[in-house]
Amino acid sequence: MRLQNRLTGALAACVFMASAAMADGTLSTSNGPVAPDTALAALFGAERDAMAAMPTGALTVAKKKAKAKRGKAPAIEHTIDWLFAQDAAQGGAQWECLAKAVYHEARGETLAGQFAVAEVILNRVDSPLYPGSVCGVVGQAGHGGCQFSFICDGRSDAVADRSAWAVAARIAAVMLAGAPRPLTDGATHFHTTAVRPGWSAVFPRTAVIGAHVFYRQPGAAPVTLAAMN
C-alpha cells in the first residue's frame, strides 16, 4: 500500500505542479468579516471578567488537562511526496467540508499555503468564538456574507480539477487526524495580498504564505497549555 501510495504521489506531484502553474490564483480574497470595534472591545472586557472570576488554581488545572489530551503530535512534512505516502484520503462530512474549503479557497496556492488554510479552519474549530465543527466553521455566515467566500459566491461547488481535489482531500485527512499546525501560529483569519480588510489593522499578523496573509483574532485561542506559554 505504501509503495502504491508513493507511485500515486509521484504522478500526482507532476499533475499538481502543472495545475498550480496554470491556476488563475487563489479564489478567495478575505475570509473573516468581524464585528465593529465596539463589539471587539466588549469581547476583551468579557474575557478579562471571565479570567478574574475563575477560582485560584483553575488555570493550572486547565493546562494539565490540555497537556494530557494533546500527547505527542505526529510528524508532518509539507511536501507532495510525504502527503501521498500517507493512507488514502477518506472520511465523513467533516472531512468533506475541510477538503472542499481547501480546494476552493487555496488550490492555486503552494502546498504549504493549502495546509495553512486548513490550519485556520481547525484553529477556529478549537476556538470558543466559533462553531465547534469543521462544517459549522466553513458554513458560518456573518456580517451580511459568508466567512469563506466560496460558500456564497454564487458559483458551483462542483470539483472540476481532480488532481487538485486529490491534494486537498489528503490534506484534510492528515489535518483531521491530528497533525500539528506549525505554519500560521494559531491564525483564525487570512486574506490575499490584493486586498486589505479593516480587521487586518487590528489583528496580529502571524504569517505570509504565498498570496495569503494570516492573522490571529485576539481572544480566539482556547485556554490551553500552548496558549498560556
Image (cartoon, helix red, strand yellow):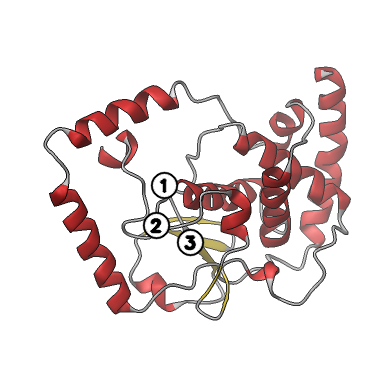
| Residue 62 visible (yes or no) | yes
Residue identifier under label 2: 216
Q: CA distance from mark 1 to mark 3?
A: 11 Å
Give the left or right position of residue 11, taking residue 83 as reference: right
Give the left or right position of residue 97, taking residue 227 as reference: right
Q: How many marks?
A: 3
Contact (CB < 8 A) between labels 2 and 3? Answer: yes
Q: Identify which residue is drawn at 72% across, 56% down.
A: 107
Question: At label 1, which amino acid type do we have?
Answer: Asp
Q: 4 or 66: nearer the eye?
A: 66
Residue identifier under label 1: 185
| Residue 113 visible (yes or no) | no
Q: x, y (%) of residue 28?
A: 64, 68
Image quarter where the N terminus lies is top right
Q: x, y (%) of residue 190?
A: 51, 63
Dot 3 lies on which element?
strand
Q: How dense is the environment of label 1, judged by Cα within 10 Å: few (below 14), some, or many (20 and up)?
A: some
Q: Nearer the viewer, mark 1 or mark 3?
A: 3
Question: Does label 1 or label 2 sit earlier along the sequence?
Answer: 1
